Amino acid sequence: MIKIERSELPNYYRSDEYKKASELLEISHQENNQKRAFFDTSIFSSLRADLVKLFHNKCAFCESSAHSPAYGSIENFRPRSGSRTDQSFFQDHYYWLAYQWENLYQVCNICTKHKRDFFPILDESTRAKVGADWSEVMKEDTLLLDPCYDDPELHLQFEINGFVTAITAKGWATVDLLKLNRSDLLNSRKYAVQSFLSYLKDHELPKRQLDEEGKSFVEDLFRSSTRQGHAAPLRSAYKRWKNGENDLSPASDAREVLSTMTNIFDNAIKSIDKESPKIKKIISKLNVFSIKSVEISNFKNIEHVKLEILPSIENGGKEPWMLLLGDNGIGKTSILQAIVLALCGKNQISKLGITASDVLKMGTSSGYVKINSYESDKEIELTFTADGFVKAIPRTPTFLLAYGATRLLPKGNLTDNTKSNRLVNIRNLFDYTKPLSNVNEWLDTIGKKMLEKRVLPALSDLLDLKKHQKLEFNDNELSIHEGKTKLPLSYISDGYKSIIALACDIMKSLSADNANYHSTKGIVLIDELGNHLHPRWKIRIVNALREAFPQLQFIVSSHEPLCLRGLAHGEVSVLMADSRQKVRLIDKYLLPDHNAMRIDQLLTSDLFGLLDTQDIETEKQFEQYYELLSVKKEDRSPEQEQKLREYIQLLAGKELLGNTPQEQVIYEVVHEVYAKNLIKNGFAPKEALKEQTVAEVKELLTAKRLDWI
């Protein structure tokens, strides 16, 4: 982190577009219509070029690359959708600063995940009042370093090995909250410093002077406008080199450095400031966790599979999802259960009554589930043998909720009598008889403030209510009001009820968090997301849950093409069984973009794998036709030849193989090549098979080996 000299106000702030957006923001905040303040994120796009120029495509906090939306985004230093501390949540802070030039920064995705809506202040009496002007805001006693106003060199010290130590309480809070000593940063800083020291050696003159090229490089390095990555540790290394230090070799491995310096770091902070215990208490509660990757071995029917979740997508700061697609029985539910058991903690596994023999793949001696996080360097591992669970974490690192394919509403004797856990709500994934929460009963137990400030705005987003529609809870019943018309929850369809019940069940678990539901982080797993839903809701469900709970990481399964709407390219993972019935994962970056496809095209793409959208009998005929075609002509038996001619006539009658004899011959050649490639490498994406087939057929036609047509 280095000091950045913020540039003058961009011309965009004098535009009518900006003025209109600011007015709409204020209006949306003042309106009491159960809607959150509306933030026009297109403003950030309009200012992206100015911010890129200011921060030189580097994260303002860690100086990592933030050159594209895949790596970084435009973020507010003071959060716009409510501010969280260890004990309080300030609902209206700092919405009015959402577009303020001084409050906009270019930040990498990992620092964004760590920071999110945390904005701790040492002395809460200095927190600005809602709507305060910038001069008043700047009087806040913040615990986070602001690289455009604070000088990081006065608070942080960078070592040759990549480690950053705090020399003030404010520096400590910043390092700890943003996890500026995470392993990827340690290694990249260490590499940058060593490369720089080699550069200095190459350009060194007597008495530690530099040649002209070296001087020019160093002059640029010390400018606030430097484009050099990890400028802070490079500056520190240069000063030590210039001062004549000879031992500038780092420790052998950054991870070793982290473990050996932890105690030194903790002890040092005690002497920094008398407020350190208070600061440590505040920061220690502000931890987050989201899944980066999952590796599963010998769990139920899964031999081995590794899944990765995107760090971010271009969706206005919402958390990425992962949707699992695959045939029934392929292992989607097993993957969800494996993730839950790895994350829920040892005591919760015991409460579920699940034994290691229940999950160990038949014929194997041991298995594991390994989970890596974007926010932590420590891998979570669940290992098991036939004798039991060998290794499991003691407790969950985050809110963990999981739902099975059958999500029943409470009715009659079907009620939830289990004692709720503040962080974990997973039983329904393993036991379908555990129903969802009774919506009206739960709403009756919460206070008016929580209902109006937290619950109803989330439900309003979920249901996409219009301005003239309003949710009310009176006489122990939730209802939708539109003018004088009242529609009680009990009157609506079961599908509609199940959506509201699912949302309320999620909110009931998340209510322990000290924030609104639009800010709460956690992990939610749902099996067969589209079950029990009308097609219209299947199309809307992803966007609806994303609007209501934008910071939750959802991992869901489905076999419904309609449920793909609302997901970005790369958020869908497809599971297939190869010729040995081994479950494998198709590279998601080789899959077609589902957002550019019609529903019928989705069904015949690699996402769903159908050969056609005809009836089941035709599907079987097509499969058998391809299987016969894959056999070389000279190797086919008379019976196979006869069967192949029958299929050609049969399928041609269904207008699948051309309308003229010439077309049918060409179709037969194309299908024969395609069938050969399909059988040879059926696990390859269809696009790759198509390209291979086109190339081979083109070669046949070019060589005039089909001139007899």
Image (cartoon, helix red, strand yellow):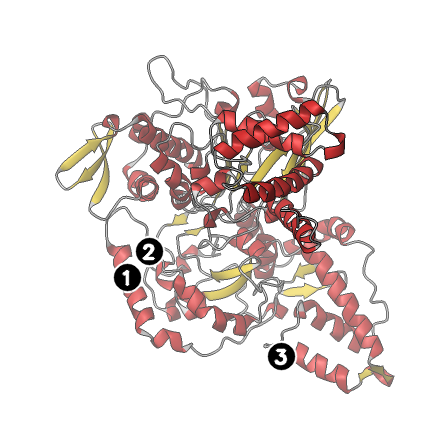
In the image, is 1 to the left or to the right of 660? right
Nearer mark to the viewer, of 1 and 3: 1
Of marks 1 and 2, which one's residue comes earlier in the chain?
A: 1
Residue at the image point whose x is 74% and y is 84% from the top: 215
Helix, strand or loop under label 2: loop
What is the C-alpha distance between the residues marked 1 and 2? 8 Å
Kind of residue at disc 1: Leu
**Picture disc at residue 38:** 2
Residue 142 lies, with reference to residue 540, above or below; the image says below
- Do the numbered discs 1 and 2 sit on residues whose CB atoms are within 8 Å? yes
Kind of residue at disc 2: Phe
In the image, residue 77 lies at what x, y percent?
47, 61
Per the image, the residue denoted by label 1 is 24
In the image, is 633 to the left or to the right of 336? right
Residue at the image point whose x is 44% and y is 60% from the top: 78
Residue 531 lies, with reference to residue 238, above or below; the image says above
Query: Going by the picture, which residue comes out furthest to the bottom?
Result: 212
In the image, residue 628 lies at what x, y percent?
66, 30
What is the C-alpha distance between the residues marked 3 and 2? 38 Å
In the image, is 694 to the left or to the right of 251? left
